[in-house]
Amino acid sequence: MPHAKDFTRHPCFNVNAKGQYGRVHLPVAPKCNIQCNYCNRKFDCVNESRPGVTSTLLSPEQARVYVDKVLEKEPRISVVGIAGPGDPFANPEETLETMRLIRRHHPEMILCLSTNGMNLAPHVPELAEIGVSHVTITINAIDPEITQHIYAWVRDGKVLYRGRQGAELLLARQLQAIELLKRHHITVKVNTIVIPGINDHHVPVLAAKMKELGVDLLNCMAMFPNADTAFEHITEPNKEMMERIRNEAERFLPQMRHCTRCRADAVGLLDHDRTGEMRGCLSACAQLPKPEEVARPYVAVATLEGVLVNQHLGEASRFQIWGEDGQGGYRHIEDRPAPPSGGGHQRWLNISRILADCRAILVNDLGDSPKEILRKRGIQPIAMVGFIERGLEAVYTGKGLAGLQGRMRKCTSKGACAGGGNGCG
């Protein structure tokens, strides 16, 4: 896995690599949690080449297949990234699942994300665990008086914030995210959209603050006026203005001067883009059956010794994976580690990802929260006591399944068994 400071094969972070190595962007994140005054959310376009645009959307599993096919056509791809068309962390489940799938199937790839930073911080430890080594955050100002003119609104959960309040919230989240990324030794690039009359005078101040926080690279990007946006009438900065601003900012941070303002479905080398050529492949992958439509061959088991189902979901540090042996019986396929205890809702989501190819899980017991999450992800939770073989037979044949589930014992733990991630499950 590439080290976080190894820029060698990342064409965006190393200008000398742009003619040797390429990137593929996976459009798995359609939702966004802020509204920029220069952004048009009509992203299903084949004729525009700018951030936030894609010709179609992919599920995580479809994205994995697409990467396989891209690498067959273009083996010089070294970076797999997610840059929208919305924000990766307005779609955290899809984003993290995609990154895990790519890491598992293509461990040699550099993993990269581009985000506004609003909801990034809670996911930084998991990004580090997966091995995401490069993250780009778009920060357009560090003064809320300026920031409030750049965004129409900022959404935190179901609450919308506007004006200075929204600007202060966004900035606080962005700075927190940078601090956590650097603490986890993740390389950070900041994108700054230069908007004449709004923040063009402010870029050197921003660059100084980013240096203070340990940011590795700054990319000053000229705003592209988009129709039907608040800033559609602002003139795009010319080359002379951009060069002056970059030179001023370079007193504090190295500058990226070779950005091509990639689409959310960009693929190929920066100076040999193959997005149009791969569009048919992208569309074909978008038509592939989604995981919930595909038969799941395995069953997960929470067991201490491999004979009995005798562990509560919250107690399990690993899961045995079982499947049919083709001769009317069953065989142990492998063991998979469970996520660390604690973490509540996120832990159950992580378990559902780890067991994405399982149709059921046999446990001694589990709480209502993980039960609901597993069912939503297509994994049938079965609480039972007894031999693994009996549970497997019930799952694969359907015989005695109702009776087996009827043996679910009533958990007497009041707090943890609510699914709070405290060990009970």
Image: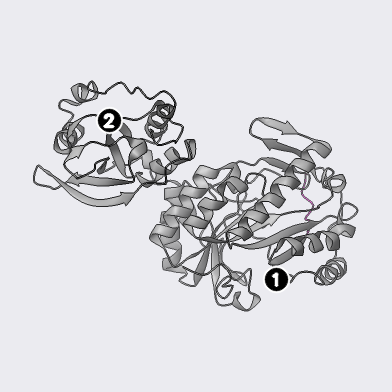
Q: Position of residue 154 (x, y in %)?
A: 72, 38
Would you say residue 224 sits in the magenta stretch? yes
- For the question of whether residue 231 can be seen, the reply is yes
Q: Which residue is mark 2?
A: 382
Identified at 57% across, 56% down, the residue is 265
Q: Position of residue 292 (x, y in %)?
A: 37, 38
Q: Disc 2 and disc 1: Cα gap in Å?
A: 54 Å
Figure quadrant of residue 248: bottom right
Q: Which of 242/99 is in front?
A: 99
Q: Which residues are magenta?
A: 222-227
Q: Residue 258 bears which disc, if any?
A: 1
Q: Label 1: how many residues lie within 10 Å, few (<14), some (14-19) or many (20+)?
A: some
Q: Residue 278 bears which disc, if any?
A: none
Helix, strand or loop at label 2? It is: strand
- Residue type, mark 1 in image: His
Q: Quadrant of the C terminus?
A: top left
Q: Position of residue 181 (x, y in %)?
A: 62, 57
Helix, strand or loop at label 1? It is: loop
Which of disc 1 and disc 2 is earlier in sequence? Answer: 1
Q: Position of residue 218 (x, y in %)?
A: 73, 65
Identified at 67% across, 55% down, the residue is 178
Q: Which of 16/233 is in front?
A: 16
Q: Is residue 163 left or right of residue 91?
A: right
- Residue type, mark 2 in image: Ile
